[in-house]
Image (cartoon, rainbow, N blue to C red):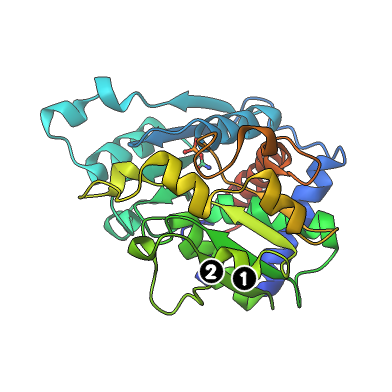
C-alpha cells in the first residue's frame, strides 16, 4: 500500500489508521524481527518526519537505512526515479520519501515497493496530517463540528494544503489566517483576532522562507505583533481550545517563547503521536496491497 495523498483514503480508512495508531500508543506489539528493511530517502531537510519514521520502523522491529542525499550520486546527476529504483533493487521493503517537487511520486509509478510520502513540495504531508488528526481526536473525541484556524504561511505550506482538505472532509469548519501575501484563495481567510475566541484548535505555521522567491515584507517583530500567538491572544481562546504547530517553530515569531509549552499547547504531544501514526502507516504499507 502506498501513502501518497490523503485524497486517496476515505474518511473510514483515515479513522482506521488513527485507530491503529492509538493501538500502538496503548502498547500493541508488532515485531518484524529484523526481517523487513525501511529506507528513509530524504531529499530535503527534516528532523521530526525523518527520525520519527525511523523510530517507528525500529519499534516495529524493522531495520532501517537512512539515505545521505548530500553525499549520494544525486551529486553526479542521478534522478529521483533511478535513486528509488536502486533501493528497490537492493531489496528494501518500503521507502519513505520527502522531496522538494510537488507530486514527485507521479514519476515513481513503475516502482514496485510501497512508497510513504514524507512531504512533497507545497503539496502533501499525509503523515503530518494524520498525527494532527490523532491529536485532535484524542482531545475532543470527534471531528464533526470542530472549528480550526490555521495561521501563517498558508500558500507555501503542505501541512495547510493537506489539512484544509482532509479536515473539511471530516466535518470540521476550517479557517485560515495570517499575512495577506501568504493567503490562499478559497481557503476561508479571516483575521486572527476575529476568530481566535471561536475555535477549538489554533494551528500555527512557520514562515517557509526556503520556498519563497521574495523576502517577507514584515520584520520578525511586526510578524509576531500582527499574527503571532502570544499570552494575550491565548487568554482569548476558548477554555477547552488547544494550540498546535507541526514544527519546527520559530520562538517569538509565530509563537511566543512562553506559549510553546503552555497548558493549551499540544505541540510536543503531536511529535509523540507522530511515532504511533508512522508505526501504523509502515505496518499497513507492509501488510496491505
Ligand atoms: N513537521 C515536520 O514536517 O517537521 P520536519 O521538517 O522536521 O520533518
Which residue in the rendered view is the most extreme toward the left? 76
> How many numbered marks appear?
2
The answer to whether residue 9 of the structure is visible from this angle is: no
SS state under label 2: loop
Q: Which mark is residue 250?
A: none
Q: Residue 214, position in %: x, y?
A: 21, 50
| Left or right: residue 145 compared with residue 91 | right
Frontmost residue, 234 versus 47: 234
Q: Residue at x 52, y 26 (%)?
A: 64
Which residue lies under the disc numbered 1? 194
* Image vertical order of residue 110 relative to residue 195, above or below: above
Quadrant in the picture for residue 257: top right
Q: Residue at x 85, y 58 (%)?
A: 239
Position of the N terminus by quadrant:
bottom right
| Left or right: residue 76 compared with residue 47 | left
Q: Residue at x 57, y 50 (%)?
A: 128
Q: Residue 104, position in %: x, y?
A: 31, 54
Q: Mark 1 CB in 8 Å range of ligand 1?
A: no
Which residue lies under the disc numbered 2? 191
Position of the C terminus by quadrant:
bottom right
* Image vertical order of residue 55 relative to residue 172, above or below: above
Crowding at mark 2 (Cα within 10 Å: few <14, some 14-19, many 20+): some
Crowding at mark 1 (Cα within 10 Å: few <14, some 14-19, many 20+): few
User: Label 2, label 1: how many angstroms apart (C-alpha)?
Assistant: 5 Å
SS state under label 1: helix
Instruction: Determine whether label 2 and label 1 are within 8 Å by CB.
Output: yes
Amino acid at each position: 500500500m502506498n501513502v501518497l495523498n490523503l485524497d486517496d483514503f476515505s474518511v473510514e480508512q483515515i479513522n482506521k489508521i488513527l485507530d491503529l495508531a492509538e493501538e500502538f500508543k496503548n502498547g500493541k506489539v508488532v515485531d518484524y524481527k529484523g526481517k523487513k528493511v525501511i529506507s528513509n530517502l530524504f531529499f530535503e531537510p527534516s528532523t521530526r518526519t525523518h527520525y520519527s519514521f525511523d523510530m517507528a520502523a525500529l519499534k516495529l522491529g524493522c531495520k532501517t537505512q537512512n539515505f545521505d542525499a548530500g553525499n549520494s550520486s544525486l551529486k553526479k546527476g542521478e534522478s529521483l526515479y533511478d535513486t528509488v529504483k536502486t533501493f528497490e533493487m537492493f531489496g528494501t521493503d518500503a521507502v519513505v520519501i520527502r522531496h522538494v517537487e510537488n507530486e514527485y511520486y507521479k514519476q515513481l509509478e513503475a516502482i514496485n515497493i510501497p512508497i510513504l510520502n514524507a512531504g512533497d513540495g507545497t503539496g502533501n504531508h499525509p503523515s503530518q496530517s494524520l498525527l494532527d488528526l490523532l491529536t485532535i481526536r484524542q482531545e475532543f473525541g470527534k471531528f464533526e463540528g470542530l472549528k480550526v484556524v490555521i495561521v501563517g504561511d498558508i500558500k507555501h505550506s503542505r501541512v495547510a494544503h493537506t489539512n484544509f482538505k482532509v479536515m473539511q472532509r471530516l466535518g470540521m469548519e476550517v479557517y485560515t489566517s495570517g499575512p495577506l501575501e501568504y493567503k490562499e484563495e478559497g481557503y476561508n481567510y479571516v483575521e486572527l483576532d476575529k476568530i481566535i475566541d471561536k475555535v477549538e484548535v489554533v494551528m500555527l505555521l512557520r514562515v517557509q522562507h526556503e520556498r519563497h522567491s521574495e523576502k517577507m515584507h514584515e520584520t520578525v517583530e511586526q510578524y509576531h505583533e500582527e499574527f503571532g500567538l502570544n499570552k494575550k491572544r491565548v487568554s482569548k481562546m476558548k477554555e477547552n481550545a488547544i494550540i498546535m504547530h507541526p514544527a519546527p517553530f520559530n520562538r517569538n515569531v509565530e509563537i511566543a517563547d512562553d506559549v510553546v509549552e503552555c497548558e493549551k499547547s499540544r505541540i510536543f504531544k503531536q511529535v509523540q503521536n507522530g511515532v504511533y501514526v508512522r508505526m501504523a502507516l509502515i505496518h499497513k504499507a507492509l501488510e496491505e496491497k
